[in-house]
Image (spheres, grey):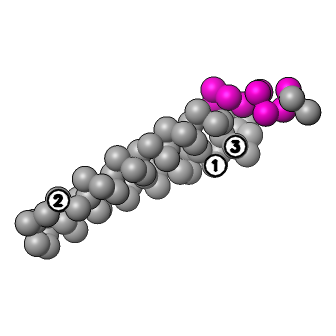
Amino acid sequence: MSHLTSPQKGFRIHLIVFLLTTPVIWIVWYLTDRSYPWPLWSTPAWAIGVLFHYLGVFVFKNQSTSKS
């Protein structure tokens, strides 16, 4: 595997933290009062953040540098 650049490494860390933390959030909800599924708010919101991070690093990476 080639050397990761800083933005790629940042995205990878963000994704790993998301994938490790989200199950913990759902477990906390499951083990506590399950009357309201509050992780339904944080999980999709964070997933959208990860998606935009991905788009910024891998899809739109050259658009910001080509204008200057």
Q: Quadrant of the C terminus?
A: top right
Residue type at the position of mark 2: Pro
Residue at left 33%, top 52%? 43
User: What's the magenta region?
Assistant: 58-66
Q: Nearer the viewer, mark 2 or mark 3?
A: 2
Give above or below for 4 relative to 44.
Answer: above
Q: Residues within 10 Å of mark 3 (few under 14, many from 20)?
A: some
Give above or below for 59 relative to 12.
Answer: above
In the image: residue 44, left or right of residue 67: left
Splitting the image into 4 quarters, where does residue 37 fall? bottom left
**Dots 1, 3 in contact, CB < 8 A:** yes
Question: So how many labels did they put on this image?
Answer: 3
Numbered circle sitting on residue 39? none
In the image: residue 25, left or right of residue 45: left
Q: Mark 2 or mark 1: which comes first in sequence?
A: 1
Residue wearing tag 2: 37
Residue wearing tag 3: 7
Numbered circle sitting on residue 10? 1
